[in-house]
Amino acid sequence: MSKFPNQLALVAVATTSVVALSVGLSERAAYRADLAAAEAQAMAEETQAAEASAVAEAAEAETVVTEEVTEEVVAEAEVVEEAVEEPAEDVVAEAPVAEDAPAEEMHAGMAFEGGTSRPALFVGAAWAESHESPMIGELEGITFDLGREALPEEVAAWNIDIRPDGQGLPVGSGDVWTGEEVYIENCAMCHGDFGEAVGRWPVLAGGWDTLTHEDPVKTPGSYWPYLSTVWDYVHRAMPYGQAQSLTDDEVYAITAYLLYLNNLVDDDFELSNENFTEVRLPNEDGFFMDDREEGEIPAFSEEPCMENCKDSVEITMRATILDVTPEEEEAEVTEAAAETSDEPATEEAAAEEAPAEEGATEMAAVDPALVEEGEGVFRKCRACHQVGEGAVNRTGPHLNGVLGRTIGGLDDFRYSGVFEEAKAAGEVWGPENLGAYLADPRGAMPGTKMSFAGLRSEDEIAVMIAYLSTFEAQ
Amino acid sequence: MDMKFKGMKPSRRSFLTGAAAAGVGSVAATVAKGQTAPDPAITELQDWQVYLGDGVDAAPYGMPSKHESHVVRRTVEWLTADNVSSINFTPLHELDGIITPNGVCFERHHGGAAEIDPAEHRLMINGLVDKELVFTMEDLMRFPRENHVYFLECAANTGMEWAGAQLNGCQFTHGMIHNVMYTGIPLKLLLAEAGLKTNAKWILPEGADASAMTRSIPIEKALDDCLVAFKMNGEALRTEQGYPVRLVVPGWEGNMWVKWLRRIEVGDEPWHHREETSKYTDLLEDGTARRFTWEMDAKSVITNPSPQAPLTHGPGYTVLTGVAWSGRGTIPRVDVTLDGGKNWHQARMSGPSLNKSMHRFYFEFEWDGKPLLLQSRAHDSTGYVQPTKNQLREWRGENSIYHNNGIQTWYVNEKGEAENVEIS
C-alpha cells in the first residue's frame, strides 16, 4: 500500500471560515470602475452621428402618456431609421444633452399608477444607442407581482451548491476506504482506479508540478484551489449519466478518497462537514483575478502599422503537417472514426464480451488461486486490453501470449516510440521486465502510451503475471 | 469539459478536399469566359420551368434547399471523450451577414441537451433576497421583454491553436461562436421582483440539465445587461441552446450563459465551482492562473476564402469577407492584409453595428493569381486592437486554452486553395 507516499497536507487553520476568496470587494470595485471608465471613453469616442441624432430626438420627446406609447415608439423607430441612413454630422453636439434624458423620462413613466402605466417603462429609457433599443431602466420599487414564494422544501431540494467556506455542506462524513469502494464501483471505469483516467476521460489524480510543463495535468491535487469544488461537482454531476445518485456520505467518502489519491491525506482519513474547511488544496494560491486591464489591454491598444510594416514574411507553421482536421465526406468520417476508435463506452462493451475463462484449461504449471486473483485484478486493464479467444487490439494491444512475446511485437498495433525501440533491440517480455512495467509504466518505459498509473503491490503484479501467462498466442 | 488540445488523432484528410468539393464553381467559371456554344442552362427547358413545385405546407417547418445540405455543424472527434460532453462548430464559411441561423449555432453540452417540458420547468430565485420566488414559464412571459443581438463565444474558441496552426477551416478554428437576436427579460427585473438584500454581491445561475451547470457572476453584471431569454431569432430557443429558457451574459464567455436555466441563487461571495476553477481559468507560463476572465477580447476571422472555402474562380475580382466581434463594445474598424502583414487595408463594414454583436466586413480586390497570406485585425470601440498570436503568447504562454483571440492567417496558393498557417 505504499504506491503513494503519505504526505500530510491537512492544514489546521485557526478559523474555519477564512478560505480566502481572492476577489475582495475593493478589487472588484476597482475593476468595475476601470470598466466603466473604459466604456464611458468608448461611448464618447464612438458616438456616431446616427446615434446622436436618435438620442437627441428622444431627449425632446415629452412625458409619455400611455395611449401615446405605441405611436411614440413607431415615431422614434422611424427617426432612427432615417438617422442610420443619413448620418447627420451636426447633431453630435447635442448628444450630451440626450444623455440625461433617459433617466428623467423613466421617472415620468413610472409616475403613473395602476397597470396601464407600466408600458411606459419601455419608452422611458429612450434610444440610448442608434439602432439599438434601450435596456429597460431602473425599477426601484416596481414589481410585477409575478411568481410565488418558494417553499423551504423546494429551496432545499434545489439549493445544493457548496462554497469554499463550507456554506451549503450537509451534515455527514465518509472515510478513504469507504470512498475507494464507492469510487471503484461508480467512477473507476472512466476515471481509472487511481484517478489516472481511462482513455480520454478526465484525470483526477496526480499532475503535481506539471503546471509549467508543455502538457499540464490539472487535477484537484495539482490545480484546483478548493476542496468544496470537488464535493460540489461530484455531488451535482457525477457519476456521469447518473447525476445526483450518490448519498451525502458517499460524496464525503469519495472526496476523501480523491484526497488520498492525490497524496493529500493518509488512508485512515475521514472527511466530514466538521473538518471539511481545514483541508486546503496545494494550489489554492495559484490563482489571481483577471488582470488583462492592467497589462495586456493597454499593450494591445496602440494604433498599428498600416504600410511597409515588415520586409519579409515566412510561413513558420502549417496545419497540414499535423493534419488533424476531420474529413468532410461523411463516409470517410465514419471510417476514420472506426479506425481510430478508442471510444471508451464501446471498448468497455467489447471488453466485457471477450471471454476470459479461456485460460482455465491452459494453466498447467500455474497456481490456480493466483490465476483467479489475477482475473480480478485484470478488471483494471479490461477497458484497454483484451485476452482470450477472439481478443483484438483496443486502446491497448491484445495480451494473448504476451509473456515471451517481443515487446511491441504486434504488427497491427501502433506502439509508442519507446516500444518500437525495445522491439528493434529484440527485447522480449518476461516476468521481470513486465513486473517493472506494470508497477510503474511511465517510469519503466518513459514515453509509453499506456495511461495507467501502475499496479499497487507486488501481490497484484504477481497474480497478474500468473493470469497473463495462461493465455497463449493464437 | 475535457478537451485535449494537443494530443491528436491523425486523419487521412488531404487539406484539398474542400477545394475538390467546390469544383462545380470552377466549371461554371470556365464556361463563362469565352463562351462559344450556347449555355444549356439557358437554352434548354429545366424541369422546374415546366412542372409544378411543391404546394404550401409541403414542409410545415421549412428547411434549407437540399443543395445546401453541406451547411452543417461539424465536430472534431478527438477533442473529447464522448459526444455527450462535447462540442461542435458553426459553419462560419457558409454564412453571411451577422445573424447565425438557429439550426447551425454551435453546441456545447456537459451532460447532453436536456429535453425539457416547459410546463414542468420552473425558475427559482433564492438566497440573499427579500422573497425567494418560483416562476413558471407562464409567469415569465408576463414580464417586460427586450430584443438584443449578441454574440456568444465559447472561451475555448481557437483554443486548439495555442501551440500553433492545427485545424484547417475557420469552422474548426473559430466556429465556437454564434450571433442571434434574443428576446428575454432583463435579469434585473427578476431580481427586483425578489428584492435584493444589501449584501447581494454575486449570483449563481444553475442549469436543469444532467450537469447542473453553475457559474458565479458578479451582481454588477447581473444588473447591467443580462437577459433571461426564451427566444432566439424570433422562435423558441432550440433544445440544444437551452429550451425553454437560458441566461444571456452579453460579451462574456459562453460557458456563463447557463442553458436550461432553473435557478438563480444570490450570494455575497463567489462559489468557485468546477467551471471557474478546474475549467475556464487561464493557466500562464509560470504556473499561476487567471480566474474570472469573463470578457471576450476583440477578435476577427476571414471566413472566405478559408480552407473550407477556397478561391475556385481563378485570377480576377473576388470578395474577401469575415466577421469580427468584441465583448467590450462595437467594431468600428477591421484591417485586412493580403501579404502577411506588410501592408494593411481598411475593410468595408456592412450591416448593423451593434454592441457586443458580430460585425460583417468585406474587402473586394483583384486577385492576380499569386499566393496570398490573408489576415484580418479587429479594432473595437475601446481602442483595443486584436493582437497577433505571438503577442498573445508573450503574455500567456501556450497553456491557457481559453481566450485565444490572436490574428488568424490563411495561406492561399496559386490554385486558390487555402491553408491554416502561422507566419513570422
Image: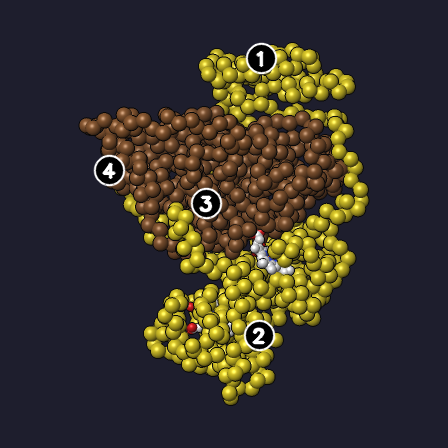
Residue A228: tell me if it is visible.
Answer: no
* Along the line of sight, the residue nearer the viewer: A38 or A351: A351
Q: Residue at x 37, y 25 (%)?
A: B49
- How far across and down, in percent of the image, does residue A254 sit? 66, 62
Circle 4 SS class = loop
Question: Looking at the rendering, which quadrant does residue B27 occupy?
Answer: top left
Same chain for marks 3 and 4? Answer: yes
Residue holding disc 1: A75
Q: Nearer the viewer, mark 4 or mark 2?
A: 2
Q: Are marks 2 and 3 in contact (CB under 8 Å)?
A: no
Q: Are marks 1 and 4 in contact (CB under 8 Å)?
A: no
Q: Where is mark 3, residue-wise?
A: B74
Instruction: Depth check: give the residue in front, A25 or B157.
Output: B157
Tell me, yes or no, whether dots 2 and 3 are on the same chain: no
Label 1 lies in what chain?
Answer: A
| Type of the residue with mark 1 | Ala
- In the image, which disc is placed on residue A377? 2
- Label number found at residue B370: 4
In the rendered structure, which amino acid carries the disc numbered 4? Answer: Lys
Q: Nearer the viewer, mark 2 or mark 1?
A: 2
